Image (tube, coloured by chain):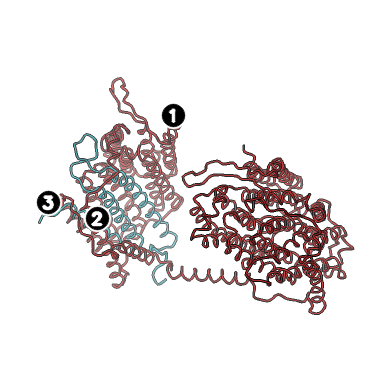
Chain colours: A red, B cyan
Amino acid sequence: MNPLATIVLLPLLAGTLLCFGLGRDNSPARRTLTALAAGGVTVAALALLLSLAPQILAGQTLIAHTDWVPSLGLSIGWRLDGLALLFALLITGIGLLIVIYAHFYLAASDPAGKFYTLLMLFMAAMLGVVMSDNIMLLVVFWELTSVSSFLLVGYWGHKEEARAGARMALAVTGGGGLVMLAGFVLLGQVAGTYELSELLTRGDIIKADPLYPLLLGLILVGCFTKSAQVPFHFWLPEAMAAPTPVSAYLHSATMVKAGVFLLARLYPALGGTDLFEGVVASFGLATVAFAAWVAIFKHDMKALLAYSTVSHLGFITFLIGLGSPLSAVAAVFHILNHATFKAALFMSAGIIDHETGTRDLRRLGGLYRLMPWTATFAMTAAAAMAGIPLFNGFLSKEMFFHEAAESTLPWGVAVPVIATLAGIFSMAYSVRLVHATFFNGAPKDLPPDAHPHDPPIGMLAPVALLAVLCVVVGVLPAVTYGPLVQVAASALLGTAPPEYHLAIWHGFNLPLLMSAIAVAGGLALYFTLQKSFGLPGYTPQRWSGKASFTCLTDSLFAFSGRLTDRIENGSLQRSLALMVLLVLVLAMAPFSAADRLPEAGSRTLLDAPPLAIVVWALLLAAGAALVWTHHARFQAVVLTGVVGMVTALTFVALSAPDLALTQLSVEVVSTVLLLMGLALLPQTSPRESTSLRYGRDAALALAAGGGVAALAWLMLTRDHASISWFFLDNTLPGGGGTNAVNVILVDFRGYDTFGEITVLGIAALGALALLDGLRVKRPTVDTAGRAWTFEQQPLLLRVAARIVLPLALVVSAYIFWRGHNLPGGGFIAGLVTAVALVLQFMALGQARAESVLHGAAGRRFSRWIGSGLAIAGLTGVAAFVFGKPFLTSAHGHPTVAVLGELPLASAAVFDLGVYITVVGATLLMLSVLGAASKENHG
Amino acid sequence: MNVSMEFLVASGIGWVTACGVFLMLRGRSFPVVLGLTLIGYAVNVFIFAMGRLWTSAPPIIGNGEVIADPLPQALVLTAIVIGFATTGFVIELALRSHHESGTDQVDGKEPGA
């Protein structure tokens, strides 16, 4: 298999299945095994990536394509270039640390299998996002990250805030993803391709298109929601209800980076315009400063880190937005740096929470003495976050200041000023994090059982590794992250960036001055706030993004609730009347738009013989009588039967013998069914409608009937072109039969028929489910007060039924057999058999009839349905054996001794399946209805 | 003036539809079932008539020059059988509802209750 696909499929299939299988039992041994499996899969993916890395670092781009739905332009395409490699290494590398850390972090009662399965799913989704070469495939993985992050944030589903946070994260990022999908569709239309490898070379066409601003806006909504840019940032702090390993992984290193990844990925196609720069860089800049300011005032360590993450994402967004090539270098460099120090800080926060039972900065303090190692590593990472020299964050922050000072944004000098302010705020919250946690007196109000000390090595090692990395990269940037940054920046820009130098010392210049101001200003700001304004006593203001989101969703729910109540008040009559009205309006709309009403067509009409007029008059009379006297229900069933008979006669007269036979036999069984149902229901309908209601219903009914009649008239007076002539030409040569209707049913459109008999079977099974075990007490007297008798059926009927049964079976066999060439076939034969069997039920009583048929109160008939469907399905599958598509038929005319030449078609076997299903479904319906009233008589 | 078959069929379909809609809008389950059955008849004949009307021309090959359009017939044949299954299902639903709620009012409660 292609190595690129393997990298994604390893966690997607092997990872999830292994973790799910191993983690079903939450014993300590199994927990360790699950973590090992997750770790092993991650290591395998990482190793595979590293084995490909030399090629990428040498400047190659690996691409692999498999067709998926070529007609829609969809393919499964994988792509590994510098940008993808950078992200994939982050995802697998940090992922591995998280797997180790989480094993020690999770409590023994937390289900490890669930955690690692979801983590693997998420890892696969992220790898898919960064390695897709088709933007539609990218969307699929993108939404998968939203879904898996929803599940991970809500991992502790018993906590209200975890559920609420997960919902909000899904609503914002999933909703943003949908908007982005719309943008992608436009992008694909404009560019004429959904493949990134081609799309990235068509930037000029895309940017010149009038749809460019729209599609850019839609895609940016997706990026900004995912990467928590203002004003969509509020979901990220709420998602901190997740277990800390999840926060460290999803909400610092990977998922929230998906938005900036996409900005970087599509930069050659979308970026470089004034619009792109203005919008992206401005939103980024606003986010950097705003979120850094808010972070200072958060008392929860994770909330502070969350806002800091939002701020740093704004930092990256700002850099990608700016047009200059060096800002691209700074952006990818900071993506790596931020992931390194922020993951370490989240994991430190998790350790502190684990050891002290709280993350509240107002209660913590003095932990440096109690857990020196944790403190050292956390302070290292915090120094990187603040941008102190010798730590990696300093380098990218310098570049950020440099770009801000040189930016061509229309905001002028405000840009470097805001950037410096953001630097001051970052310093302030970093100092607060360190000071309030590790110094500042002793911890207050800790739980009595908390004895804070350094955690086991498994929890500390990942933090240590990342902290060491912060220093090493900070000192030696060019030899550590340098090569990766170079290829990633090339992939972002579409060309190699100009000469640049990753180093600590660039001489005394403006960025250095801005850094100095930021460090000094941040220290001053924190201690001033702490001393003079009582930072720990600060309570957040009421207005927030979260509150407005909640308010928005609440009012949406209330609105849809009111709307639903308006339309649907629980009354079926009202709903049906509205539906009929809606259909009328929809059907009339096209006519009202036309200049004049359509007239009858010019087709030569058929003269109606007198008999037809008589039958028509009978129909009108039966319908009128039915409406008039429907309160008398028995009579209404009979009149409905009359309408059915007229329908059958219509089919006879108008060259549809198959339909006539079907209608006639259906008429018998459905009348029996209606009468059996009626026996258990009230015999009359009360007169309860007001005359107003009658008037309304009559108007609706007449309008609907008049409309249908008019449509039918307009249609019938016109000639038609039909695809049927194809069927007629091919019925004999292609289907091996002369009855076109039957050949269409069992051969040309066999797939439809298979679906239809399945529906038939489901309806019958549904009836069984409704009535199985139900026993309705039958009334003992009729409406006139006369007692019902349950004596044995008349002798004559019993004798007749006995004689009729074999005859009917022979007739149905004959109808079945000739169906391919003359009117008949499985449906009709099945109904005829069913009618004959119903007669047995009536003559012998249900108990005896079913003992003959082994019906077991109807339940057994479900097996008939099953075997009928199986026969039909297997006939279809048999075509595979001959290398043909499903349900391809074969036919021949073998000569058999005695019987002579037999026209045989494989479709006949399919028809047999139809036959058995029809008999089974019909009997099942009748039988469960009969069984419902079997007892309690007398 | 001669009356045409087309007129009879079109007006017949319309009339049965009207009766069906009226019964469907009643408040008791049994007339609703009958109404649905009637609408089923009308719809089936309407679809059948899409192939236009032909006399003495059943769609059997070799039965003469002109033969009727077989496709709507094939569609309607299965529709009739499924219509029967639907009728069966709905009548059993009505029975169950009557059993559960003690009334055959379609909303499961007596008017005014």
Q: Amino acid at mark 3?
A: Pro
**Residue drawn where x is 84% and y is 51% of the image:** A457
Indicate left or right for A379 with B72 as reference.
right
**Residue drawn where x is 56% and y is 61% of the image:** A175
Q: Indicate which label's residue lies in the foreground, 1 or 3.
A: 1
Mark 1 element type: loop
Residue occupied by mark 2:
A712
Identify the mark nearer the N-term, 2 or 1: 2
Instruction: Locate the N terminus of chain A and report the quarter of the image it occupies.
Output: top right
Measuring from the top left, give residue A24's x and y in whole percent. 68, 47
Q: CA distance from mark 3 to mark 2?
A: 22 Å
- Which of the 4 image quarters holds residue A918? top left
Residue A882: numbered disc:
1
Instruction: Locate the C terminus of chain A and report the quarter of the image it occupies.
Output: bottom left
Same chain for the residues at labels 3 and 2, yes or no? yes
- For the residue pair B42 and A846, the one nearer the viewer reads as B42
Give above or below for A743 relative to A457. above
**Residue drawn where x is 27% and y is 44% of the image:** A659
Residue occupied by mark 3:
A610
